[in-house]
Amino acid sequence: GQSLEQPSEVTAVEGAIVQINCTYQTSGFYGLSWYQQHDGGAPTFLSYNALDGLEETGRFSSFLSRSDSYGYLLLQELQMKDSASYFCGIYGQNFVFGPGTRLSVLP
Amino acid sequence: DSGVTQTPKHLITATGQRVTLRCSPRSGDLSVYWYQQSLDQGLQFLIQYYNGEERAKGNILERFSAQQFPDLHSELNLSSLELGDSALYFCASSVAPSGSNYGYTFGSGTRLTVV
């Protein structure tokens, strides 16, 4: 089976940098993705790592290490609108999401 | 507008009833996925269809079923509804059967309330 773990909550101040970690257990997968979900909204795709290393998209970066079964999402120059839940997910036999991390950005 | 259309947006029904949720994928996408999200919970994968065929199954109850039609729209049927089935049901679509740099595109969801 597949399982993922994320911290349940993270708090940071506007302008700061925050890292949301994701550890997983799976027998094999294609890649790791990150999604953002605002309260009451639909998840939106942020990033995808098929290979080990860092992928950068604007203020957001995502990292994958298959040898460590670990990935993270890095958010820089935090803004109030970044307050949301962030889900990691792995594409294996099907796409399984982690439990989500609620990020609160304080002024 | 993400391009994935889900109807209805809201649904209130009684226990024991049956409902059908509908999803039209983004133009060009062949894969459709259904997810259930209960209050303050994560996204639970239910089932995936690719070009009309069932491709993967998650924790979908026997009371639930789905299908994808030749025009690629999909329906999720929920029967013998229980209070615990109250949740947001999301449909997502993708062009590929598995992950890609483009990810999944989610619809705005159907909020089901069972009373």
Image (cartoon, grey):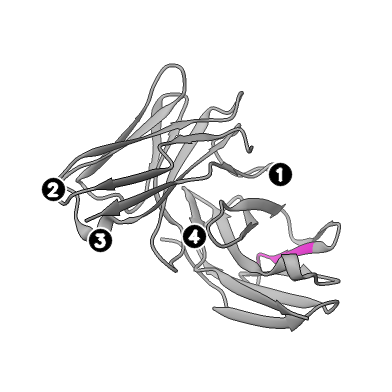
> What kind of element bears circle 3?
helix
Tag 4: Cα neighbours inside 10 Å, few (<14), some, or many (≥20)? few
- Image x and y of residue B13, in percent: 23, 47
Q: Nearer the viewer, residue A105 or A6?
A: A105
Please tell me whether mark 4 sits on a helix, a strand or a loop.
loop
Quarter occupied by the C terminus of chain A: bottom right
Distance between mark 1 and mark 2 Cα atoms: 41 Å
Residue A87 visible to the viewer: yes
Q: Closer to the observer: label 1 or label 4?
A: 1
Disc 4 sits on a residue from what chain? Answer: A
Residue B40 numbered tag: none
Mark found first going from the N terminus, 3 or 1: 3
Alpha-carbon span between mark 1 and mark 4: 22 Å
Q: For mark 1, what is the residue? A: B101
C-beta proximity under 8 Å, tags 2 and 4:
no
In reply to whether residue A63 is colored magenta, the answer given is yes
Magenta-colored span: A61-66
State which quadrant residue B77 falls in. top left
Q: CA distance from mark 2 to mark 4?
A: 39 Å
Protein chain holding label 2: B
